[in-house]
Amino acid sequence: MGTAYADQAHAINARDVSFDFDSVPMHYIPGEVMATHIINVMHLVLPEGERAMAQALAEALPQIDDERLREEVRGFIGQETMHAGSHEKARRQLESLGLEVGPMVDRVAWLIDRLLGDHGLSGRARHEWLCERLALFAGMEHYTAVIGEWLLTNDKLAAKGMHPAMLDLVRWHGAEEVEHRSVVYDAYMHLDGGYARKARQALIASSGLLALFVISSAYLFQRDPSPNKGRWWPLQMASASLRGVVPNFTTFLTEIPRYLRPGFHPSQLGPMDNALRYLAQSPAARAVTERSEGTMNTVAQAGVTEPSASEAES
């Protein structure tokens, strides 16, 4: 059992936000076909892994006796549930434009379930397998937090004219990845904390995510029905990465030493100011606030009635 949980005093909660994707085109980063599909992987494929993370954390919850960490885990699970719903709407929009997304997402979901499910184990074997999965997911969350910070600070997507709804979606998701970057790591350290397991699974996470991005992006490019999408997707992928339109793929290699440094903790990635600021000010968040204020005003107005004749005379 790990030490008591003592992360930043910040509550993690699911946010009820919604996005309007009705006007999103196939290539929502103008002139960047492959970059668009790399971003598509973030919001179409990665949520399947997040679903598996949430399931593993739900399985771990009864074994976590630190109430603060339990609160964080419950908040993480709630956020990932909201992510799934928001990304599903984006998926339906792209499918309506002719992008064949379903078969790939279904295949990834099947593979994740086969590889990362609980396998019906019990006793000590069940606990060990849970720790293996948490170590793997902790490594993955390191990369999603780094990419999330990149999404928040990179200005090239906006400069390229990326559709505002999609830009808001990926930045909102990235901000929440930064916000809950420590949860899976802390859950793993609480239940096990072994360095050898952490290191082994971090290497698997790094290579697995890199392969997932390349294979899934290539699949989406090939299924893209647009006649003007260009050719040689590997060249387009390399170009987008080198120009900073998408995160540099070397991140999956250069981040390994930092993550495996003894004494590392995700909070050392830096302050989460950018993430919290965006979560408070994003267009989707403002829309929720405006709807809430509108509802409150309506209720308040409904409570104001015209005075009766006797009241008016008095």
Image: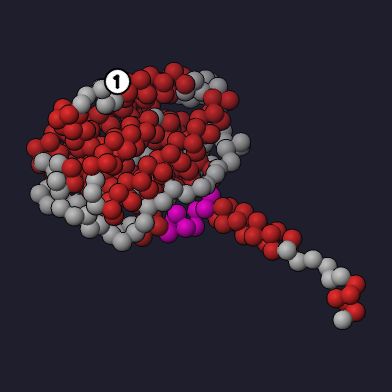
Q: Amino acid at mark 1?
A: Arg
Front in this rendered view, residue 23 or 182: 182
Give the residue at x 89% y 75%.
310
Front in this rendered view, residue 220 or 80: 80
According to the image, label 1 marks what residue?
114
Q: Classify mark 1: helix, strand or loop.
A: helix
Front in this rendered view, residue 274 or 71: 71
Residue 193 seen in the figure:
yes
Question: In the displayed structure, does residue 243 sit left or right of residue 312?
Answer: left
Please tell me whether residue 219 belongs to the stretch shown in magenta. Answer: no
Q: Position of residue 109 (x, y in %)?
A: 37, 24
The rendered magenta stretch, by its main secondary structure, is classed as helix
Magenta span of residues: 277-285
Q: Exactly how many numbered labels are in the figure?
A: 1
Q: Position of residue 64 (x, y in %)?
A: 24, 46
Q: Residue furthest front?
A: 310
Question: In the displayed structure, does residue 199 sit left or right of residue 173?
Answer: left
Q: Position of residue 69 (x, y in %)?
A: 27, 51
71 above or below 303?
Answer: above
Give the residue at x 26% y 22%.
120
